Image (cartoon, rainbow, N blue to C red):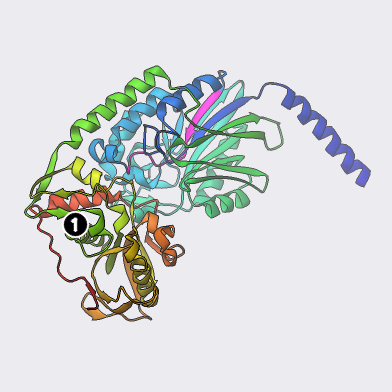
Amino acid sequence: MKLLRKGILLLAALAMGLAFAAKPDFTLFHSNDVYEIQPVKRGKLGGAARVATLIKQLDDGSLIVTFGGDAFSPSIMSSLLKGKQMVDVFNKLGFDFAVYGNHEFDFGPAVAEQRVKESNFPWLSSNLLDKRTGEPLAGGVRFAITEVNGVKVGFIGLIDDWLELTSPGDNAQYLDFVTVGRDLARKLKAEGADVVIALTHMDMVHDEELAAKVPEIDLILGGHDHGGMFKVVNGTLIFKAKSDWRDVGYLKVYNIPGLKPVVFLEVIPVTNKIPEDPAMAKVVDAYVKVLDEKLNVTIGETKVPLDARRKTVRTMESNIGNLIADAMRDYAQADAAIANGGGIRTDSIYGPGSLTRKDILSILPFGNVVISVKVSGADLKAALENGVSQVERVKGRFPQVSGITFTYDPGAEPGQRVKEVFVNGQPLDPNKTYVVAINDYMGRGGDGYSMFKDAPRVIDERSGLLLANVVMNYIQAHSPVAPKVEGRIKTVK
């Protein structure tokens, strides 16, 4: 029996070896979670013009370009254009299939449907339906089949239940991804599909569950996790690229009748070593010019000077720190908010007078998003201790707060400086759970805020809005603003 099994394996290996020596039946180019059409990381990574070059280099006539969701938001450009620039770029890149991500619905279902209509490719929505009609939400399709080199390839689009993270409307209906995935994969196979691919926008643990429970799915190309990852579960490859085209996946697929296809994955970093496609570069530049023009638009007025000077925001309560923290708390509907002073830049005073989008982006340039976390009162106090632990060194961890008042002794030992804390007028309870709005940098433990790193999320990094947008929206809603230094942070005298 052992010899027979070895012989079968040897024959299979020889057959696959012959297949690998030949041209693949088809290839795939996969990306996900793209918010910027221009390069990121100071121009070193990503950018639609470099991606255009890569697609042209890799397209051998069998290339299928797929996308794992999240494009219409959040970014400063999308806050102005509501994702229209993303569809334009995706169309010009020749996208073939995409799945909805949660950020596709940040501007509501009507805008999402408009963007889908503008797309030259289908948005797959297998288990996100309109409960009035039973059809895919916002003009999506439940499945699709394409044929390449005689191989029929079926696509489905699956999500996990992230509806509460965005704004898909009251008619959105979520169905279990395993049940729908199994039913549609079997349907596609029955209709002649040789290979079934699931485009997903889910947490990796749910992609793994899908692979484990639905063997009829041959390949999972995902999104939602921004870090880039791949894994084989139950013989099925799962792949997700890094966000913002920091890298992409190039996959060679060999169809083997009666068996799962064999897939070779190459993860390609999109760096400044890749030349920009001139035509796409012009498209990007035109949108950047539009953005620059729109940034000079007035969003509101301040009746008082806003003090964004470095020494102010890193050593004491600041009126602009109060404004930013209030905007964060209001957006997150949180008990409190903490903004790290180092995230407030320009070292300048603004106003009194009009405020433009450019002003706010200059003050908050980092592209952080607002998240909210659940922490104990003890951890909240620890966060404040961390915030004032290096005040004498003018470090960026200094906390600008909302919903909180506290007193600290800058002369005491670090970790023992905070003397009393009140949350919304009540003494801090070390055993109570509080919801605190912060930015995602602090949520990763940045500036020493390690207590937030593993804290349960209410609004997580994938669903929060850009901090600059949150502040701009708040100013527009409350203009004219006149924030004061009002004793939120006191020092022991």
150 horizontally vs 480: left or right: right
Asked if the magenta segment contains residue 30, the reply would be no
Q: In this view, does 26 lie above or below 123?
A: above
- Secondary element type, mark 1: helix
The residue shown at (44%, 35%) is 98
Q: In this view, does 452 lie above or below 104?
A: below
The residue shown at (30%, 50%) is 465
**Along the line of sight, the residue nearer the viewer: 321 or 185:** 321
Q: In which quarter of the image is residue 484?
A: bottom left
Q: In this view, does 154 lie above or below 420?
A: above
**Along the line of sight, the residue nearer the viewer: 189 or 470:** 470
Asked if the magenta segment contains residue 73, the reply would be yes
**Three-letter amino acid code of the residue under disc 1:** Ile
Q: Can residue 1 be seen in this view?
A: no
362 horizontally vs 58: left or right: left
Q: Where is residue 87 in the image (x, y as percent from the top left)?
A: 34, 31
- Magenta span covers which residues? 63-74
The residue shown at (50%, 20%) is 56
Q: Can residue 95 be seen in this view?
A: yes
Q: Mark 1 points at which residue?
A: 320
**Along the line of sight, the residue nearer the viewer: 129 or 50:** 50
Which quarter of the rendering shows the C terminus?
bottom left
Q: Where is residue 185 in the image (x, y as percent from the top left)?
A: 56, 41
**Along the line of sight, the residue nearer the viewer: 91 or 281:** 281
User: What is the number of callouts on the image?
Assistant: 1
Q: Position of residue 22 (x, y in %)?
A: 71, 21
The residue shown at (41%, 52%) is 174
Q: Where is residue 361 in the image (x, y as percent from the top left)?
A: 24, 44
42 horizontally vs 298: left or right: right
Could you classify mark 1 by the number of other residues whose Cα lies within 10 Å: few (under 14), some (14-19), or many (20 or more)? Answer: many
